Image (tube, rainbow, N blue to C red):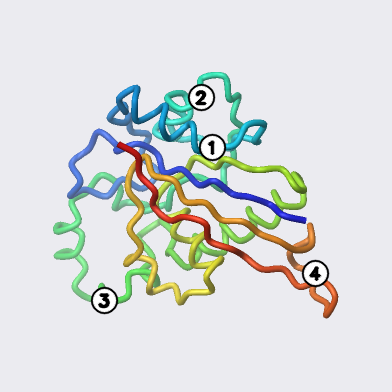
């Protein structure tokens, strides 16, 4: 069985890029019509559309496919940055000198979640939806942390490499899983594998 995942990062949020977004429900800078049509043309017909419940993701779905009727999936929500959401990165770093900022994947924001926890959340989500939609192509409109987590899982990367992966707003990352519907199943006869078709594909 093959399961294709078309990960689309939401459009750029209307917020100072020097601030943490986290799970704030921010609007996006709307893409121009040509960009939206070109990206939509790269997405499969008959796919199951999934979306983070945040407005930035839902607005991105509307720009790409107004009739998509995307399923809202809580696990596709951006990383929970707790009390850091909306604050300037420089301010947070200065206020927390005890944190090892050289390894941000292990950093757990106050009242939030670390990137390592985002990886665990994404792994559970992918396993559940591969079982729920066997063989169906999936278009998942989500956020940078979730897409990076999906790539860490697919490429079996150490979590600390995730910040080095560029995922631009309104970009496409295409991954596919070939193997058992139950990704937890392991045997000599049924060994699954991920394949990366594209990362951070942008259209202009």
Q: In this rendering, which labeled residue sits more in front, label 3 or label 2?
A: 2
Q: Which residue is mark 4?
A: 185
Percent x, y for residue 177? 66, 59
Graded by Cα atoms within 10 Å as few (under 14), some (14 to 19) or many (20 or more), the crowding at tag 3 reads: few
Q: Are marks 1 and 2 in contact (CB under 8 Å)?
A: yes
Q: Is residue 48 left or right of residue 103?
A: right
C-alpha separation, residue under disc 3 versus residue under disc 1: 36 Å
Kindly report the distance in space between the C-alpha atoms of the residues bearing marks 1 and 4. 29 Å
Q: Nearer the viewer, mark 4 or mark 3?
A: 4
Q: Nearer the viewer, mark 1 or mark 2?
A: 1
* First-in-chain label (3 vs 2): 2
State the mark number for residue 43. 1
Q: Residue at x 21, y 68 (%)?
A: 96
Sequence-wise, which precedes: disc 4 or disc 2?
2
Residue in the picture at 62% in, 56% down:
176
Proximity of marks 3 and 2: CB atoms separated by less than 8 Å: no
Instruction: Mark 2: give few (<14), some (14-19) or many (20+) Cα within 10 Å.
Output: some
Q: Residues within 10 Å of mark 4 (few under 14, many from 20)?
A: few
Q: Which residue is mark 3?
A: 102
Residue 40: % across, % down: 47, 31
Q: Earlier in the sequence, mark 3 or mark 1?
A: 1
Viewed as shown, does residue 84 lie left or right of 36?
left
Q: Earlier in the sequence, mark 4 or mark 3?
A: 3
């Amino acid at each position: 069985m093959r399961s294709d995942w078309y990960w689309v990062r939401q459009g750029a949020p209307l917020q100072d890029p020097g601030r943490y977004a986290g799970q704030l429900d921010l609007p996006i800078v709307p893409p121009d019509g040509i960009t939206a049509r070109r990206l939509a043309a790269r997405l499969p017909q008959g796919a199951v559309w999934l979306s983070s419940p945040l407005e930035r993701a839902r607005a991105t779905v509307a720009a790409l496919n107004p009739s998509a009727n995307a399923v809202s999936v809580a696990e596709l929500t951006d990383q929970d940055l707790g009390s850091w959401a909306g604050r300037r990165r420089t301010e947070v770093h200065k206020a927390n000198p005890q944190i090892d900022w050289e390894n941000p994947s292990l950093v757990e924001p106050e009242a939030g979640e670390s990137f390592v926890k985002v990886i665990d959340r994404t792994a559970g989500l992918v396993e559940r939806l591969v079982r729920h939609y066997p063989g169906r192509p999936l278009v998942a409109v989500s956020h940078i942390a979730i897409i990076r987590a999906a790539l860490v899982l697919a490429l079996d990367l150490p979590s600390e490499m995730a910040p080095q992966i560029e995922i631009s707003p309104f970009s496409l990352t295409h991954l596919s899983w070939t193997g058992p519907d139950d990704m937890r199943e392991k045997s000599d006869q049924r060994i699954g594998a991920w394949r990366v078709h594209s990362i951070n594909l942008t259209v202009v």
